[in-house]
Amino acid sequence: MEKPILATNIDGLLIKHSAFIEPHKYWFERAIRQTGDENLRKWIGADPYFPGVNEAMKKLMPNATKEEQTTQARTWYQQDVIKYIQKHPEVIIRSIEKKLRNLKRSYKIILLTSNTQDYINKIIKISGFEGIYDDIIASQTSKEPSKEELLNQLIEKHGKPKYYLTGKQEPKLTEKLAKLEIKVLEPKDIDFI
């Protein structure tokens, strides 16, 4: 019999949210310094924030295509995330890692992440998470991230997950999961899986 699917994110679950938010802030601070445009500051912590990324990249790479701008923006960000995790190993949440490794006996564990396909394996490696995931559904570096689209890819490839375990609030994704009757769990619920 095939194991049920447990899909997870990584941000706030296995790695503290600060490892993703601090590089986000740094990314915009760097863009402000390089462009001299203080108006970009309004995008720090904004939701959605990608319009600000697009605005900054048009100024930083005016002759590049949108795809080239997006690729470069996401590459800089992912590199910053990796550097942050390396400098701050305390952001890795080992207790959840151990629990997920134990759950592998009963579940097919799939990572659903808006981190890029090009960099998620590096993030997993530097964090010591090799072997946890049976598959990784990640975004493309050249496209704006969309967890909803990634969920569609996961379902198309593996079928509907039984659970989605997340360490942060993801309103659009949570709404879609509810419509699909996929139960959303938080780290405090992991012992009940």
Image: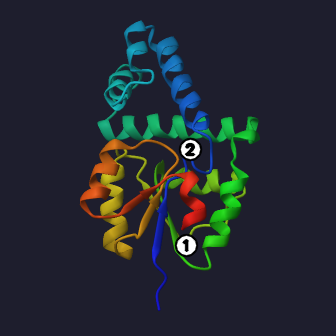
Residue position marked by numbered label 1 in the rendering:
134
Mark 1 residue element: loop
* Res. 144 visible in picture: no
Residue 9, given in percent of the width and then of the height, sits at 50, 53
Residue lying at 37% horizontally and 29% vertically, measured from the top left: 49
Dot 2 or dot 1, earlier in sequence = 2
Q: Residue 3 location, x and y as percent?
A: 49, 82
The numbered disc on residue 109 is: none
* Residue at point 27%, 63% (across, down): 180
- The furthest residue to the left: 179
> Badge 1: few (under 14), some or many (20 or more) residues near its Cα, within 10 Å?
few
Instruction: Count the labels in the image.
Output: 2
| Amino acid, disc 2 | Gly
Residue highlighted by disc 2: 12
Q: Nearer the viewer, residue 47 or 105?
A: 105
Q: Nearer the viewer, residue 11 or 135?
A: 11
Which amino acid type corresponds to the residue marked 1 in the rendered image? Answer: Asp
Give the x, y percent position of residue 14: 62, 51
Task: Tell me the residue at 40%/52% (across/down).
Answer: 140
Q: Is residue 146 left or right of residue 4?
A: left
Vertical side of 152 occupied by 188: above or below:
above
